[in-house]
Image (spheres, helix red, strand yellow):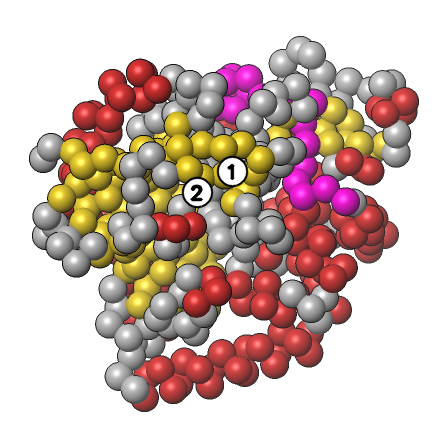
Amino acid sequence: MGVEELRDSVNGIRMKEDMRRAVIENVTRRTQQPDGRQTEQEGSGKIMQNRKKSRIMKNLAAAALVVAVIGVAAVPVRALVNSLVKERMEEMPQEEKETYVETLKEQEVEADGYTRAYTESEKERYQELASQYQAGTFPREAVTQVESEEEAASYELCFLKPTSTFCLPDRELTDEELLQIIDFITKRDYAFEEDYAREHAEEIAAQEEQEKAEIARNVESGGITEQQAIEIATRKLYEIFGVTEDGFERNSYYDEPDEMRGLREAVYCVNWSNIITHQYYYFYIDAQDGQMTWAAHSGEFIHAQSVELEEAKSRIPALQAQATECMERTVGETYDKVYVYYLSYPDGSAGLSVGFFFAREDQSAWSITYTWDGLMYEIEENGISGLEDGMEREMWNGEESIKTNVVFQELEQ
């Protein structure tokens, strides 16, 4: 991501009662409004789409709408981790699958909504139950799907189809209800993936053949193979995030340079997804020299909150120390200066995230980005050209443009 496109954004679920500032995805990150405004876009918890399929889908309007709704193109859902879950998906009646797909195609929203935020207890139990679901613990019943708000009022828990909204009870969700939500989302993603693969088999096959040819040319010119990129990314997965492949589906693809999307060099994108626990890890590996150029982590329950400016300033030293340790441990390159980057909003808050740039004399840099509570979710080979302290940036929060000011200051080392 070029620094001119750096956005103050992280991922999260959408909440109807709390729309002061959109809680958004981290790296659906190069998207802008047609008029050039940068956007803080609401998200469903997935960090980015699989470009292999998004390239195919960009000329397929209906399919593109579905991907915008749930972001499932990043997930190879037909190759589910656990055979019991896979068996459950394969046993789903065709009529049920068609209902999921039809509902998605008719929706006009970008992500699922929730009538309230999950409580901390619900978030914890969701993750625990997601693990149990993977091991074969399934709900006794299914989430009720309704067509109108009037109909929804008759149920404590239901899914409002026209607006893709989970209507949650005022009380804590039971384990059974959380399992129903997990099951609903998993089945829906599976149904869409299967439908997409069937409808666009020719386009997918053609894309795969084109990709094979691109990889062959890359290797002939001295570049690395896809398998080598996977091995590099697998090591980095543990070095950076302390995570192994266990419980995840791996996906990888080759992407040629594209200035419009900020890809200066050809890369392999290697990613790990768990569609049940909603955890996602992405890596860009340079297709020539095998260097990692970008890594990111996303999950449905990774959230960020803005803090007051004075509070932000007090947290910077500790976060800088954390970023420095990460830089030395995972990148290991020299740098000359360290800068902090965040946005200052008119209401006196410091936005949703903070980045640290470890810059060299030629203005090239590595950036490491955190939520204010210390979660590192992105590391990238970057640069500081064009960044100035105090420069104005117009952010789109989903409803209106908000003028913000960049805080970009050198820090003592």
Quadrant the N terminus occupies: bottom left
Taking 273 as reference, is 188 left or right? right
Tell me the amino acid under the disc marked 1. Met
Comparing 133 with 411, the one in front is 411
Q: Which mark is residue 395?
A: 1
Tell me the amino acid under the disc marked 2. Arg
Comparing 61 with 408, the one in front is 408
Residue 97 placed where, x, y %? Answer: 78, 52
Q: What kind of element bears circle 2?
A: loop
Pointers 2 and 1 in contact (CB under 8 A)? yes
Taking 231 as reference, is 96 left or right? right
Residue 253 placed where, x, y %? Answer: 46, 68
Q: Is residue 33 magenta?
A: no
Q: CA distance from mark 2 to mark 1?
A: 8 Å
Query: First in sequence: mark 2 or mark 1?
Result: 2
Taking 336 as reference, is 308 left or right? right
Q: Is residue 111 magenta?
A: yes
The image quarter in which residue 156 lies: top right
The image quarter in which residue 21 lies: top right
Q: What kind of element bears circle 1?
A: strand
Q: Which residue bears the numbered disc 2?
A: 7
Relative to 4, residue 148 above or below: above
At a point 36% along the width and 68% down the height, the residue shown is 264
Taking 375 as reference, is 185 left or right? right
Residue that sits furthest to the front in the current view: 391
Q: Residues within 10 Å of mark 2 (few under 14, many from 20)?
A: many
Comparing 333 with 308, the one in front is 308
Quadrant the C terminus occupies: top left
Residue 159 placed where, x, y %? Answer: 77, 31
